[in-house]
Amino acid sequence: MNVQTVSYHTVEVDDRRVFYRESGPQDAPTILLLHGFPTSSHMYRNLIPLLNKEYRVIAPDLIGFGFSDAPDRSRFTYSFDNLTKYVQGLIDLLGLKRFAIQVFDYGAPVGYRLAVANPEKITAIISQNGNAYEEGLSEGWNPLRKYWQEPTDENRNNLKAMASAEMTQWQYFTGVRDRSLVAPESYLLDQFLLDRPGNIDLQLDLFKDYASNVALYPRFHQYFRDYQPPFLAVWGDKDPFFLPAGAEAFKKDLSKAIVKFYDTGHFALETHVQEIGEGIRIFLRSLT
């Protein structure tokens, strides 16, 4: 098989099936791509071909997303600790000893947990709108904060709109100058999977547990200070959820952090994949 071909795999990790995309030479440096809400590894479909000539690229779907298992919440605890457990299981199954991580949205608290647990394995971190600082959280988080503070049925039900088709498209289009650059299969696939029976409740569980990520911010910051991993932030500066101040904040703890902004929104790879891909290649080449 041509090393630049993307292959698609489903493996058993503990008691669940985890789907992942893989491409690139097996003996090349590895990059682990971690997606966010409400998407899947599909969000990296255009980035993988820009990296797979020089790197082994692995992009899993988190449990509850994409083509990985999405067990009923009565049989699975939807928490970020648990999402991380299955990515760690995939890392162990594949025998990954050293790798860079690219994190986005939900993939950020998963990736930072992995880095804290495996500091010796992390060669670099690339954050595409993957927040780790309070100043990065916009007012768009206020309904979720209210639910964290008052976990009532009313506050929970008020968040159901976050998984609606209108909100999914809004996330993709907000801050984008040219909407024709956003592939419709991106948000339509996300919504198809969000609309599976029972999926809304698992998403609401994760909305509630996002508070655990904010509580871990100091621990993430300590990891950054202690280990100083090479760090690149590539940030859509019109993101309605994660503000540019969140990208700049990494410089407080990472003395050599590189921060680059792009004139786009949350899903920056939909509109600026060529520029971001080139920036990632330049960054990673500088580490060798």
Image: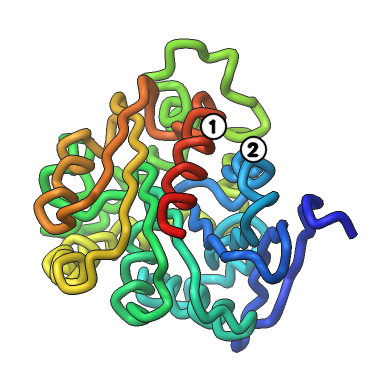
User: Is residue 154 visible in this depiction of the protein?
Assistant: no
Q: Who's the residue at 68% across and 71% down the image?
A: 27
Residue drawn where x is 26% and y is 57% of the image? 153
Residue tagged by mark 2?
A: 46
Q: Name the residue under label 1.
A: 273
Is any atom of residue 282 visible in this view? yes
Q: Residues within 10 Å of mark 1 (few under 14, many from 20)?
A: some
Going by the numbered disc 1, the residue's amino acid type is Val
Q: Is residue 135 above or below residue 275?
A: below
Compare residues 67 and 73 and report the one nearer the observer: 67
Mark 1 to mark 2 CA distance (whole Å): 7 Å
Quarter occupied by residue 60: bottom right
The image quadrant that residue 63 belongs to is bottom right
In the rendered image, residue 221, in percent from the top left (x then y), is placed at 15, 64
Q: Which amino acid does label 2 sit on?
A: Asn
Vertical relation: 266 (above or below) 5 = above
Residue 48 in the figure: left or right of residue 159: right
Identity of the residue drawn at 57% across and 65% down: 30
